[in-house]
Amino acid sequence: MTHSFVVIGGDGAGMSAASKIKRELPAAQVIVFERGAEISYSACGMPYWIAGVVDSDQRLIVLTPERAREKRGIDVRIGHEVTAIDPAMHSVTVKRLPTGESFRQPYTKLLIATGASAVRPPILGLDLPGVFTLRNLPDARQIERFLHERAPRRALVVGGGYISLEMVEALHARGLAVSVVEVAPQLMPNFDADMVDEVSKHVRAQGVALYLSHKVNAVTANGDGLIAHMTEADGASGLVQHIAADLVLVATGVHPNRTLAEAAALRIGETGAIWVDDHMRTSEPDIFAAGDCVEHRHLVLGKN
């Protein structure tokens, strides 16, 4: 029997699974549907390309679709978006984005590896030119293009987590004056305060302005630049402060891309991500899920 495996998403989890399947079952048909133009790139390296440490965005690409097809025997189809999953029929509906044409693809086993998207908090003005999120390579290219073409002098980073601080370092390295607004009373809120204290001191020592326990409520245009309107996180004083910037990066976290799973009536976990068991199976036994779209068992806390 020839097995047909379908993978939705061509980044880390999806391509790792596809490659493993071909190693274990060389005769199996493995199809990867990716709506973007690239697969298997180093998202973690994007801030370092923007900083100039990595000299080209092409250095971030680990595996091309052509190489995946030729060397690994994986049927990678870029520019293809899966729009629906039919567990009863063991098929997915796929749209060819260049033409808009849709077709159905049957599967024996399915892997959902749809990843996560950047959170867009309820801040007015996030659609203004010069306001960015950073989640994928196209996002990074937009930021790099803006830096090259507009030569901004001032940057505001909303959020104090991993991506935020990596981009603070990158923008500082590009010569921008950088400010950070974080709603929590410390940077890196998922760490204990005493561990982060030295980080805050170091960031400030580099000339970065930190606004902790503050939140941005709106961004407005101001000539060729932007103005961020900020208040204390608890809103107690009612005082509104204003920060001028030429570039605003919103990095307040991510949320799992679960729409396909929800529409297929797959179980969604307590965290809001796709539920999976210890073998990455969803509530449908022939559908698996992996990567940033799923929740997982925390061995220390004993919960998902």
Image (cartoon, rainbow, N blue to C red):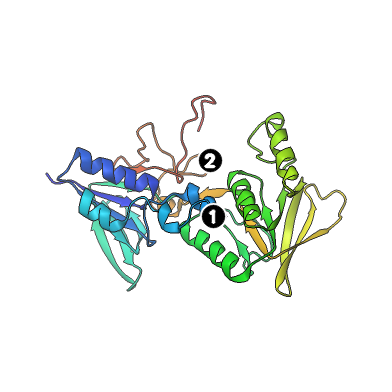
The numbered disc on residue 95 is: none
Q: Amino acid at mark 2?
A: Thr
Q: Is residue 241 above or below residue 145?
A: above
> The N terminus is located in which quarter?
top left
* Residue at figure coordinates x 22%, y 47% from the top left: 108
Q: Amino acid at mark 1?
A: Gly
> Which percent across, then down, holds residue 287?
32, 44
Tell me the element at label 2. Answer: loop
Please say whether residue 186 is visible from this viewpoint: no
Crowd rating for badge 1 (residues with CA inside 10 Å; few <14, some 14–19, many 20+)? some
Crowd rating for badge 2 (residues with CA inside 10 Å; few <14, some 14–19, many 20+)? few
> Which percent across, then down, holds residue 39?
36, 54
Depth check, mark 2 against mark 1: the one in front is 1
Q: Which residue is mark 1?
A: 52
* Residue at figure coordinates x 72%, y 42% from the top left: 184
* Residue at figure coordinates x 58%, y 48% from the top left: 163
Task: Please state which of residues 119 and 20 is positioned toward the viewer in this rendering.
Answer: 20
Tell me the element at label 1. Answer: loop
Give the quadrant of residue 202: top right
Q: Are marks 2 and 1 in contact (CB under 8 Å)?
A: no
The answer to whether residue 51 is left or right of residue 208 is left
The answer to whether residue 231 is left or right of residue 141 is right
Task: Please state which of residues 39 and 96 is positioned toward the viewer in this rendering.
Answer: 39
Q: Report, in whole angstroms, how far the alpha carbon at label 2 lies from the one at label 1.
A: 36 Å
Q: Which residue is mark 2?
A: 271
> Which percent across, then down, holds residue 98?
34, 72
The answer to whether residue 201 is left or right of residue 63 is right
Of the two numbered discs 2 and 1 on the same chain, state the one appearing first in sequence. Answer: 1
